[in-house]
């Protein structure tokens, strides 16, 4: 009898992708489902970026690219980091991959081994613990609820560190919460990390450009941990380029070299056309980024107001990304039509089947008391979706 490896058997399927698939199946049956489960901008890629991709095809960029990416793109990323983040990197510290997801996984596979501990603040992006499993490491979850604005404290971080701790992953702006660490909050974490020189810091900044605080703050800005910090970023969210599949790391040379070596054995270089489009994204007009960010902020204000009209949802004020992550535990134990809600996964399925709105239960993000709702869709869809949600929740008694 055929069987899969222990490594694969240990992995959990992505609940966000699973809910999106269920939504698509209902749509295929003719049911009008509004999908708030997917973490994807609804905007199209800006024209000047698409034109660069088309030109790359015409210019015959159809051959293998260097494993870490074209030098011209890595230079563009270094220029972006210098201009936007005041950080100095050289091209040999940049490795481009097939999306930021591969970038994170490359780093973990390069630095962690059997039994190594990786600290992951919760709520977390669903794939972090699964990637640690692939590396045969152990996730150490540090939880911060809505009362903390979903952000861990320096004390919590210090208490989680052991002699086996290899790394920490921090995502700010956050998926799934939309929370953004301030400079002073990041400095508090950096001062703890500075006392543990064997730890690698993975700073996932893929939502950098969807930030409503006025300025992005990176963990890499602090000199006491800069030489051990890996920035993960990419074009998917800020430039509406999810399908182009291009992410990157800016890392200490030793880690960049390790990721280059690893990637060279299992995917090689990222798509050549996507790389030339990404180059145009970073070097071209940035007004498209500001326009999309403005639209997301308007939608954020709308959905926070609409969600707070449901008395059972406790909602914080996100400062970035395009999600709200309300505490929905007030609905646990309530019933409608013979159906009882026991957790957020139950509630997500109830909202899909009763209200025809797709969301994702918080257990997959390490916060079973919450539910994730994306507002990366039109204002009209959001108005309709939260109207349906309100009706469905009012039925629970």
Image (cartoon, rainbow, N blue to C red):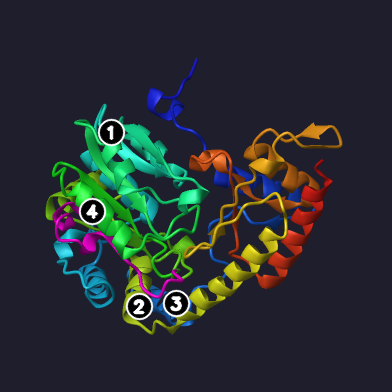
Please tell me whether mark 3 sits on a helix, a strand or a loop. Answer: helix
At which x and y percent is residue 162?
A: 23, 32
Residue at image point 13% right, 50% down:
254
CB within 8 Å, label 3 to label 2: no
Disc 4 target residue? 190
Disc 1 target residue? 117
Residue at image point 23% right, 68% down:
74
The numbered mark at residue 289 is: 3
Residue 289 found in image quarter: bottom left
Segment colored magenta: 211-231
- Residue 143 shows in this picture: yes
- Seen from the viewer's position, the closer of residues 106 and 139 is 139
CB within 8 Å, label 1 to label 4: no
Location of residue 187 with respect to 126 vertically, above or below: below
**Alpha-carbon distance for marks 4 and 2?**
33 Å
Label 3 crowd (10 A; few <14 / some 14-19 / many >=20)? some
Residue at image point 47% right, 62% down:
242
CB within 8 Å, label 3 to label 4: no
Disc 2 target residue? 280
Q: Earlier in the sequence, mark 4 or mark 2?
A: 4
Q: Earlier in the sequence, mark 1 or mark 4?
A: 1
At which x and y percent is residue 8?
A: 42, 29
């Amino acid at each position: 009898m055929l069987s899969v490896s222990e490594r694969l058997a240990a992995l959990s399927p992505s609940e966000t992708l699973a809910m999106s698939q269920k939504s698509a199946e209902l749509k295929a049956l003719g049911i009008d489902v509004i999908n708030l489960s997917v973490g994807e901008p609804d905007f199209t890629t800006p024209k000047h970026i698409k034109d660069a991709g088309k030109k790359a095809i015409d210019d015959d960029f159809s051959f293998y690219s260097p494993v870490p990416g074209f030098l011209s793109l890595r230079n563009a990323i270094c220029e972006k980091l210098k201009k936007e983040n005041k950080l100095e990197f050289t091209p040999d510290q940049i490795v481009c991959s097939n999306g930021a997801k591969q970038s994170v996984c490359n780093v973990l596979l390069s630095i962690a081994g059997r039994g190594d501990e990786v600290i992951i603040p919760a709520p977390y992006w669903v794939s972090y613990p699964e990637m640690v499993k692939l590396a045969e490491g152990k996730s150490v979850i540090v939880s911060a609820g809505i009362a903390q604005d979903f952000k861990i404290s320096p004390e919590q971080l210090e208490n989680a560190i052991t002699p086996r701790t290899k790394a920490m992953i921090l995502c700010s702006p956050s998926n799934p919460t939309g929370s953004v660490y301030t400079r002073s909050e990041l400095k508090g974490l950096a001062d703890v990390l500075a006392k543990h020189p064997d730890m690698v810091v993975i700073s996932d900044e893929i939502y950098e450009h969807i930030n409503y605080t006025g300025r992005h703050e990176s963990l890499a800005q602090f000199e006491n941990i800069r030489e051990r910090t890996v920035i993960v970023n990419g074009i998917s969210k800020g430039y509406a380029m999810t399908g182009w599949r291009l992410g990157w790391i800016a890392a200490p040379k030793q880690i960049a070299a390790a990721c280059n070596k690893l990637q060279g054995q299992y995917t090689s270089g990222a798509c050549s056309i996507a790389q030339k489009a990404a180059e145009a994204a970073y070097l071209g007009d940035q007004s498209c980024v500001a326009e999309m960010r403005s639209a997301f902020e308007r939608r954020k204000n709308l959905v926070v107001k609409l969600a707070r009209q449901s008395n059972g949802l406790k909602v914080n004020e996100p400062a970035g990304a395009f999600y709200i992550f309300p505490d929905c535990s007030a609905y646990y134990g309530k019933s409608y039509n013979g159906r009882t809600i026991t957790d957020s996964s139950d509630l997500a399925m109830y909202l899909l089947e009763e209200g025809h709105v797709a969301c994702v239960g918080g257990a997959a993000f390490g916060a079973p008391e919450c539910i994730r709702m994306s507002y990366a869709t039109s204002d009209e869809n959001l108005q309709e979706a939260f109207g349906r949600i309100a009706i469905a929740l009012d039925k629970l008694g």
